[in-house]
Image (cartoon, grey):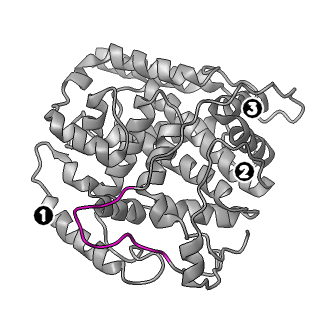
Amino acid sequence: GQNQNQNQSQNQDQDQDSLDLLGASLIPESDATPLEACPSDRIGSYSNPIVILDDPSVPVELTEISLTKSERPTFKKRRREEDANDTERVDFTRPLNCAHPVAVVVGSSFIKLTVSLHVFTEFPAAQENRLTHKRSEVQRLQKLRVRGNRLAMADIGNEFLRSGFEGGLVKARSRFSGWKGIEAWRQFDDKFRHMRAQAPDAASDVVLRDLGTFQAIEQLLGYVFKDKRLLEESLTYSSTLPNYERLEYLGDTVVELVAAAYWVRRFPINKSSACWYLIAASVSNVTLGAMCLRSGVYHHINYVGRSSMTSVFNGARANVLEAKKGPGLYWSKLKVPKILADIMESLFGAVFLDSGCEFGPVCDLFMRLLEPELRHLHHGVEGS
C-alpha cells in the first residue's frame, strides 16, 4: 500500500513538472520588448476540392442561411446566382492584419493548439479525456485565457497571420512572462518523433492494412503519409489504444485554427461573434460528421473489437444526400453519429503530425474536404 501511494505521488509530481514546462505563471507583459518574428513557416498550396465519383448526386451548393437565435449573427438573403459566381480562392500564405476583436479569436485558437501539442507530447499514454483535463489545467494555472488577456491574444493572433507558427510562438513568448519549454515551433515535431521512438510498442500495435487500401484513402485525402501507422491509427475505432482518440484530441484544435485562418482571409470580419460563429459552424460535430459521410471517408474506418457500422453509416449518408435538397446548412438538423466527426478530427491530427507540424497540409485537407461545402456560409453575416 505504501509503495502504491509513493508511485501515485511520483506520477502526480511528474504530471505537475510537465505542466510547469510552459511557465509557472504566464501573465501578459504590457511593457515587454517585442521580439523579431521568425520567417514564416512553409505553407503549401491546396489540392482541388474532392470530386465524389461513387454517387450521381452533384456537389451541394449552399444558399442563404436563416437563423432564429438572437445571439447569433444575422444573415441577409443572397441571390443564388451570386453564390454561383463566388469562386474566390483563399491564400493561406498571405500576410494579414485583422481587426482586434477577430485577432483575439485567432490568438486564442493558436494558444489552444500550442498547449494541446505540449500536453500531447508530454503524456504519450494518456487518452483524450485526460489530455483535455491536462490542457484545461495548463490554461488555468498559467492564465492562458482570453479573459484579461485580450490585447496579448490579439497580438499573438495577428503575428500568426503575418508570420505563421514560428512568428506566433515568438510573440506568445514575448507577451507572457515565464514562458518556458518550447522556444521554436520545430521543437514540437522533434518532441513528437522522440515520443514515438521512446514508445514504439504503441505504434507497433497498429495493424496495417494492405497497400491498396492506403492508396485509396490517401487519394481521397489528397495527402500521402510518410508514417502509414499514423493514418491507420487515425481510422482505428477501438476501445483500447492505439485508436483514434489521441489524434482526435489534437485534430480538434488543428481544424479550429485552420477554420479561423480561413474565415479571416475569406472575407473581412470585424466582430468576434461573427468569427466565432463561422468557426463553430465549420467544425461542429454535425458538420464534420456530415462531411465524413459526404466524402466517403467513413468507408475506411477500421473496426477493432467492434462490429462494423458501415451499413448504418450508409443509411446516414443517404439522409445527408437527401437533405442537400434543402437550403442553407442542409445537414444542420440531421442526427449524425459523433464518431464520424471524431474520425475527421483524428485525420487532421494525423496529417498535422505526419507533415512535421506544418500548417500547409492541414489547410490543403480543409480545402479539399470541407471548404466546398462551407464556401458560402458567410454570405450576409453582419460584422463583415
Question: Could you say which disc has been placed on residue 117 in the image?
Answer: none
Which region is colored magenta? 50-62
Q: Which residue is mark 2?
A: 104
Q: Quadrant of residue 243?
A: top left
Q: Which residue is mark 1?
A: 311
Q: Residue at x 35, y 46 (%)?
A: 221
Q: Quadrant of residue 193?
A: top left
What amino acid type should be assigned to the residue bearing mark 2?
Answer: Val
Asked whether 227 or 8 is in front, the reply is 227
**Is label 3 in contact with label 2 (beta carbons under 8 Å)?**
no
Q: CA distance from mark 1 to mark 2?
A: 43 Å
What amino acid type should be assigned to the residue bearing mark 3?
Answer: Lys
User: Element at badge 1?
Assistant: helix
Q: Which residue is mark 3?
A: 171
Q: CA distance from mark 1 to mark 3?
A: 49 Å
Q: Position of residue 27 (x, y in %)?
A: 76, 34
Q: Earlier in the sequence, mark 3 or mark 2?
A: 2
Q: Is residue 123 visible?
A: yes
